Image (cartoon, helix red, strand yellow):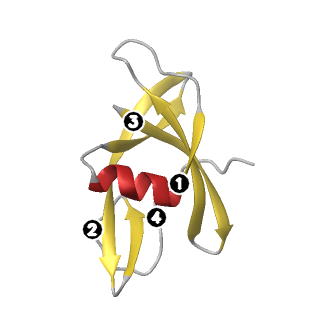
């Protein structure tokens, strides 16, 4: 499972990159970075992503991430709303 645990925005509501961790079933992996386009392509090719956040020192599963197409643009969203913006909830912003 691929967990998105942080987000960096270009400005406004467009994601530049996300912080991704791989869960092997017992341990949350070391964070790496992936561009918005890399995540969109990975989802297109069958990978799944879910948001995750820390609560009381433990990782908690958030929502499934999907690609939503509005016009000719594609966005990463945790909802199915056809809005011209990325939306991964209230994940922390990373530098």
Residue 58: numbered disc: none
Q: Earlier in the sequence, mark 4 or mark 3?
A: 3
Rendered image quadrant of residue 14:
bottom right
Q: Position of residue 95 (x, y in %)?
A: 75, 49
Residue 87: numbered disc: 4
Q: Secondary structure at mark 3?
A: strand
Q: Position of residue 9 (x, y in %)?
A: 64, 63
Q: Secondary structure at mark 2?
A: loop
Q: Position of residue 31 (x, y in %)?
A: 59, 31
Rendered-image quadrant of the N terminus: top left
| Marks 4 and 3 in Cβ contact (< 8 Å) | no
Which residue ends up furthest to the right in the rendered image? 95
Which residue in the protein does label 1 denote?
A: 90
| Marks 3 and 2 in Cβ contact (< 8 Å) | no
- Relative side of 45 to 55, left or right: left
Where is 1 relative to 68, above or below? above
Where is 4 relative to 9, above or below? above
Measure the alpha-carbon separation of dots 4 and 2. Answer: 10 Å
Q: Earlier in the sequence, mark 3 or mark 2?
A: 3
Residue lying at 47% horizontally and 21% vertically, measured from the top left? 28
Residue 87 in sight from this viewpoint:
yes
Q: Nearer the viewer, mark 3 or mark 1?
A: 3
Residue 2: numbered disc: 3
């Amino acid at each position: 499972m691929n967990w998105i645990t942080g987000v960096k925005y270009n400005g406004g509501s467009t994601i530049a990159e996300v912080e991704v961790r791989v869960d092997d079933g017992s341990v949350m992996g070391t964070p790496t970075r992936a561009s918005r386009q890399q995540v969109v392509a990975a989802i297109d090719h069958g990978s799944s992503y879910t948001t995750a956040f820390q609560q009381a020192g433990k990782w908690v599963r958030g929502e499934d991430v999907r690609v939503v197409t509005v016009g000719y643009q594609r966005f990463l969203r945790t909802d199915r709303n056809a809005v011209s913006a990325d939306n991964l909830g209230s994940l922390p912003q990373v530098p």
